[in-house]
Image: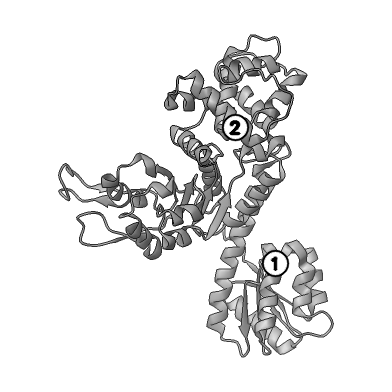
């Protein structure tokens, strides 16, 4: 069955121009219709929204800028191209801000129009596809794919994800440990046109500096001792998909310029190879450090930072999205109860208060671990604040004798100190008890020592 032709609407007050463009577009395989002004074009769009619009700027009545402004949100689904003999920088900027894809001056070069129209239609199709997928992912219960939360910081994150997903630009995700940076990267991949391709995660802190280059770029047989066969690096394995590099600031300094070159050129050369291989990979990098501080401290090259942070997504700490804590806790409890074949226990009134009052230094990871312990150990018939203290925080949490409320930072500090005390100063055990990594615990302790 033949695919339906894409519909392009021509808007121009000159009849000869309209007829000529309709004939030209029809010869290219499009279905073209025409309107003499913006008002008539709006009527066409109300009945059937076209895939693209080629419109004049200066027209009697409603001009081209007023026409696309009147389209409102529908403009995001279209490839809009302006044609005018009175091109100025000001009108071009205004048209792009209103949602136009490009701006071509008269007299028109047909081949240039053909190229711009094809690219504009492709981008518009990706935007419509991402929008449809976003509607399927969004849930009235406060989730967005695998991400859960309905707080203002999370809704802002969802909005930025939907905008970034349709592009191929690199993304830098920052935030404290346990905030869900890999989950955000996976959601970004699932929303993108690359979702049918591979999603490959790599933790830079888990790879020794001597092996990092081979992991990223691959090597040929015999390239070095123990290179007994060819090895494809992460860039080649992720070709056509997304490469997620966690803890990017831990990448060896000598590897960073080579990594930057691959990002710039789209070419990767295995160790020991004589030629390069073209790859198409979207890179999403993550760090629990503040990016500017990482650059200042020499942990991340400045030029690499700029290349990675075309879009920067900063994830909120759990304490900054308190209204999401009960949603997340219920989700984790239900999934853990199913996993361990335990009954789902109702919540006592004081349980939510206990959830909200904890500082959660380990963020979502700590909350998930706490709910897993609770699902396994709570005796029932309901879950109370006492169960929370006994199974989620004990021996970290002790009864307070004073009635003065603590700041979140002070509550976090005291929680960490109690965990260390309960573990006789063993940082690894204390980190496990808190549901955070030893590295995060060390960073927290270093911050306290500076205070």
Residue 79 in sight in this render = yes
Report helix, strand or loop for mark 2: helix
Q: Earlier in the sequence, mark 2 or mark 1?
A: 1
Is 60 above or below relative to 315? below
Is 182 above or below relative to 98? above
State the residue in front, 393 or 400. 400
State the residue in front, 103 or 31. 103
Pinpoint residue 128: horizontal percent, then vertical percent: 64, 57
Rendered residue at 55%/41% (across/down): 451
Residue 360 in sight in this render = no
Pinpoint residue 410: horizontal percent, then vertical percent: 62, 33
Rendered residue at 30%/55% (across/down): 254
Q: Give the total number of marks visible in the rendering.
A: 2
Model colouring: one colour
* Disc sitting over residue 50 in the figure: 1
Mark 2, Cα crowd under 10 Å, few <14 / some 14-19 / many 20+, is some
Mark 1, Cα crowd under 10 Å, few <14 / some 14-19 / many 20+, is some
Q: Could you tell me if the residues under marks 2 and 1 are in contact, i.e. CB atoms within 8 Å?
A: no
State the residue in front, 9 or 203. 203
Name which quarter of the figure residue 187 lies in. Answer: top right
Pinpoint residue 380: horizontal percent, then vertical percent: 67, 10
Rendered residue at 54%/36% (across/down): 178
Question: On the image, numbered disc 2 is attached to which residue?
Answer: 412
Report helix, strand or loop for mark 1: loop
Pinpoint residue 433: horizontal percent, then vertical percent: 51, 23
The answer to whether 19 appears left or right of 367 in the picture is right
Rendered residue at 43%/23% (across/down): 426
Quadrant in which the N terminus is drawn? bottom right
State the residue in front, 446 or 26. 446
């Amino acid at each position: 069955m033949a695919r339906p032709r894409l519909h392009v609407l021509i808007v121009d007050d000159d009849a000869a121009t309209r007829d000529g463009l309709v004939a030209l577009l029809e010869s290219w395989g499009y279905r073209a219709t025409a309107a003499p002004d913006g008002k008539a074009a709006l009527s066409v769009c109300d009945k059937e929204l076209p895939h693209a619009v080629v419109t004049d700027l200066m027209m009697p009545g409603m001009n081209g800028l007023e026409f696309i402004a009147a389209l409102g949100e529908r403009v995001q689904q279209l490839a809009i191209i302006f044609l005018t003999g009175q091109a100025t920088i000001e009108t071009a900027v205004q048209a792009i801000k209103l949602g136009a894809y490009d701006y071509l001056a008269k007299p028109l070069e047909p081949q240039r129009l053909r190229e711009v129209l094809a690219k504009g239609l492709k981008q518009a199709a990706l935007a419509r596809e991402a929008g449809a997928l976003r509607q399927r992912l969004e849930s009235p219960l406060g989730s967005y794919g695998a991400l859960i939360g309905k707080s203002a910081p999370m809704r802002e994150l969802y909005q930025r994800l939907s905008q970034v997903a349709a592009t191929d630009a690199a993304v830098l995700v920052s935030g404290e440990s346990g905030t869900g940076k890999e989950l955000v990267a996976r959601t970004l991949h699932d929303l993108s046109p690359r979702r049918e391709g591979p999603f490959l995660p790599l933790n830079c802190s888990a790879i020794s500096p001597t092996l990092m280059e081979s992991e990223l770029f691959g090597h040929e047989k015999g390239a070095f001792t123990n290179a007994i066969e060819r090895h494809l690096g992460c860039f080649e394995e992720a070709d056509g998909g997304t490469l997620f590099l966690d803890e990017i600031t831990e990448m060896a300094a000598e590897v960073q310029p080579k990594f930057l070159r691959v990002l710039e050129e789209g070419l990767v050369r295995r160790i020991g190879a004589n030629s390069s291989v073209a790859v198409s990979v979207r890179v999403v990098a993550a760090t629990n450090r503040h990016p500017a501080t990482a650059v200042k401290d020499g942990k991340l090259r400045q030029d690499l930072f700029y290349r990675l942070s075309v879009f920067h997504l900063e994830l909120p700490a759990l304490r900054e999205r308190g209204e999401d804590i009960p949603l997340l806790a219920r989700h984790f409890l239900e999934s853990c109860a199913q996993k361990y074949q335990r009954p789902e226990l109702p919540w006592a009134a004081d349980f939510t208060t206990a959830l909200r009052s904890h500082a959660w230094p380990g963020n979502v990871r700590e909350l998930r671990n706490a709910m897993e312990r609770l699902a396994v150990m709570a005796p029932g018939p309901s879950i109370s604040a006492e169960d929370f203290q006994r199974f989620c925080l004990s021996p970290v949490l002790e009864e307070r004798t004073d009635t003065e409320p603590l700041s979140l930072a002070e509550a976090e500090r005291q929680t960490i100190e109690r965990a260390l005390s309960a573990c006789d100063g063993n940082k690894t055990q204390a980190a496990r008890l808190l549901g955070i990594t030893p590295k995060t615990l060390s960073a927290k302790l270093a911050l306290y020592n500076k205070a």
